[in-house]
């Protein structure tokens, strides 16, 4: 469905690297690899502070470790594929834009929706957790009354939306700093708890002595744990959304994404290690703030304060990055007329997609307050599962995307900032592990998965029947690319 | 008492930021032509410098 013939400037056209003319607005090209690292790791790191430990409830300590490693392979593949494709498709919208170029408009529309839902749901969950943290902090300070959670949910989202509205450089600089502090807090906990000398404060005897401790529900439990293993890394692919705002996407995206993935692998292993050696698996599996609880268990005050700070900062960084990414995806779809063009506007002063940012604010607030409003805290896990499943659907697309990319523009035919090794092994591994995790999630959240797929099907029908006629097939392709193989 | 003040402060700050963003967005939409606000096209990069040699690491 991709109409290559209508792309203006794709054949024998001069490369376009100069600044846009003054009569044309563009997103600011101000980001470097550190910002990309801050965006990718910032979205994810909250998963180390909370959430990953639900894998322990499903599969025990070793189940969580297996999930960490298996899902770690999945995301390493995601990072490699994204680094190659996005270092070439340097456009806001990330995987949405890739789908538009590689497969066609219907896939692009769906991938765009996957992205918006993934990040908006995650942002809503982050804001909800922020309100929980506010309540917890008030409790630790001796306050016994009830705290109005709505106030802090709305505050968190509005402050971060304001930051995003005013400019991407400040937004992602803040993300880099607070994410860095949250990561350092995990490293300090590792050393502070005696990570180099297990046996002093860390005890692994329980894990080694009996399978009941390590794998309490056997291999089935380890399989079920896969869905929560996603928490260790979910969102690293969000680095792609900033491609259009990088000074050099060809350099910044691969550097930021790959170093981000390495950071997350280190953080995940340290997190599992200190928690598994400190807390019993029965407690860890249901804890809300496992790393903070680990720090509390050491009895060292400075570690407890540091990890409390890390929890708050990681949550803020995640919500901040999610606003950035969801708005870029929404903006890109508006720019191509996949949604009303009104959303494709850029602020002439701040150079941000201001309407997309504003439009998604009430949506995030609605999903964040829903568990509180209905007095059903378990709805939070449903909101998060929406995010995880949308991401999994997108990873399935990435497999086809990678094969198409290499076939249409083989190596040597198109400049790449990074070329990932061992193709097609990463794409095939991604397909296999994503299918496994999808099935594991289906076992736990089958109804949610079916609901979500129904939603995407209905949205696709809406797009085909009511929206596609407005899509300008030629003008949406402005990359100065050469003609693909076979066209 | 302190928590109540913080809650009120949270509402006031949230409302202030929301109103400011809405005010600014409406102002921009009225001041600038809609066609101008939506003139951006998907990104380009220095990767496409004609003098650049084909790149790519390990394959």
Image (cartoon, coloured by chain):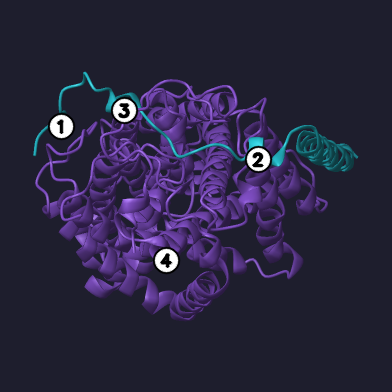
Using the rendered view, name the quadrant where residue A247 is placed.
top left
In the image, are marks 1 and 2 on the same chain?
A: yes
The residue pinned by badge 3 equals A14
Q: Nearer the viewer, residue A128 or A290?
A: A128
Badge 4 marks a residue whose secondary structure is: helix
**Is residue A316 toward the left or the right of residue A417 in the image?**
right
Q: CA distance from mark 3 to mark 1?
A: 22 Å
Dot 3 and dot 4 within a common chain: yes
- The disc at residue B56 is 1
Q: Earlier in the sequence, mark 3 or mark 4?
A: 3
Closer mark to the observer between disc 1 and disc 2: 2
- Tag 4 residue: A106
Measure the C-alpha gap from mark 3 to mark 4: 30 Å
Element assignment for label 2: helix
Q: Colour of chain A?
A: purple
Tag 2 residue: B35
Q: In front: A68, or A283?
A: A68
Residues at circles 2 and 4 in contact by the CB criterion of under 8 Å: no
Q: Colour of chain B?
A: cyan
Other-residue count near label 4 (Cα within 10 Å), few / some / many at <14 / 14–19 / ≥20 = some
Give x and y (percent) for residue A214: 26, 61
- The residue sitting at 20% across, 54% down in the picture is A487
| Left or right of A133 in this view: A487 | left
């Amino acid at each position: 469905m991709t109409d290559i013939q209508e792309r203006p400037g794709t054949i024998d056209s001069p490369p376009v690297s100069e600044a846009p003319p003054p009569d044309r607005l563009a997103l600011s090209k101000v980001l470097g690899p550190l910002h990309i690292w801050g965006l990718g790791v910032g979205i994810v790191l909250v998963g180390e502070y909370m959430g990953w430990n639900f894998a322990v409830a499903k599969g025990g300590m070793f189940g969580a470790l297996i999930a960490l490693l298996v899902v770690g392979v999945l995301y390493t593949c995601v990072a490699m594929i994204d680094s190659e494709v996005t270092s070439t498709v340097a456009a806001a919208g990330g995987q949405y834009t890739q789908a538009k170029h590689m497969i066609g408009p219907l896939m692009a529309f769906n991938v765009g929706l996957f992205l918006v839902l993934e990040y908006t749901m995650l942002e809503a969950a982050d804001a909800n957790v922020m309100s929980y943290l506010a309540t917890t902090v008030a409790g630790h300070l001796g306050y016994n009354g009830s705290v109005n959670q709505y106030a802090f949910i709305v505050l968190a989202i509005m402050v971060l939306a304001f930051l995003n509205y005013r400019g991407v450089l400040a937004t992602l600089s803040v993300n880099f700093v607070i994410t860095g502090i949250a990561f350092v807090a995990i490293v300090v906990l590792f050393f502070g708890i005696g990570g180099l000398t297990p046996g002093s404060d860390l005890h692994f005897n329980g894990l080694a002595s009996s399978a009941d401790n390590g794998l309490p529900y056997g291999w089935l439990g380890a399989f079920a744990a896969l869905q929560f293993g996603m928490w260790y890394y979910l969102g690293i692919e969000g680095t792609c959304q900033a491609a259009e705002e990088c000074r050099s996407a060809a350099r910044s995206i691969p550097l930021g994404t790959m170093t981000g993935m390495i950071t997350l692998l280190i953080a995940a292993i340290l997190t599992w290690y200190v928690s598994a050696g400190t807390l019993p698996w029965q407690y860890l599996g249901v804890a809300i703030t496992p790393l903070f609880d680990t720090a509390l268990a050491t009895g060292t005050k400075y570690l407890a304060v540091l990890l409390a700070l890390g929890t708050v900062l990681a949550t803020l960084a995640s919500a901040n990055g999610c606003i950035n990414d969801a708005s870029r995806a929404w903006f890109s779809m508006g720019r191509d007329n996949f949604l009303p063009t009104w959303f494709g506007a850029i602020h002439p002063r701040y150079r941000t997609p201001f309407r997309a940012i504003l439009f998604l604010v009430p949506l995030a607030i609605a999903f964040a307050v829903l568990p509180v409003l209905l007095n059903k805290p378990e709805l939070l896990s449903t909101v998060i599962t929406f995010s995880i499943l949308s991401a999994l659907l997108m990873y399935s697309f990435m497999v086809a995307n990678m094969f198409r990319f290499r076939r249409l523009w083989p190596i040597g035919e198109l400049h790449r900032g990074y070329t990932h090794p061992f193709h097609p092994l990463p794409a095939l591994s991604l397909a296999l592990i994503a299918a496994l995790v999808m099935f594991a999630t289906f076992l736990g959240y089958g109804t949610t998965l079916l609901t979500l797929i129904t939603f995407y099907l209905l949205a696709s029908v809406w797009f085909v029947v009511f929206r596609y006629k407005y899509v300008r097939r030629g003008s949406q392709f402005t990359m100065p690319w050469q003609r693909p193989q076979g066209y | 008492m302190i928590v109540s003040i913080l809650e009120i402060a949270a509402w006031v700050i949230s409302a202030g930021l929301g109103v400011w963003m809405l005010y600014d967005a409406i102002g921009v939409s009225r001041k600038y032509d809609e066609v101008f606000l939506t003139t951006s096209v998907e990104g380009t990069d220095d990767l496409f410098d004609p003098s650049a040699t084909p790149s790519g690491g390990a394959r």
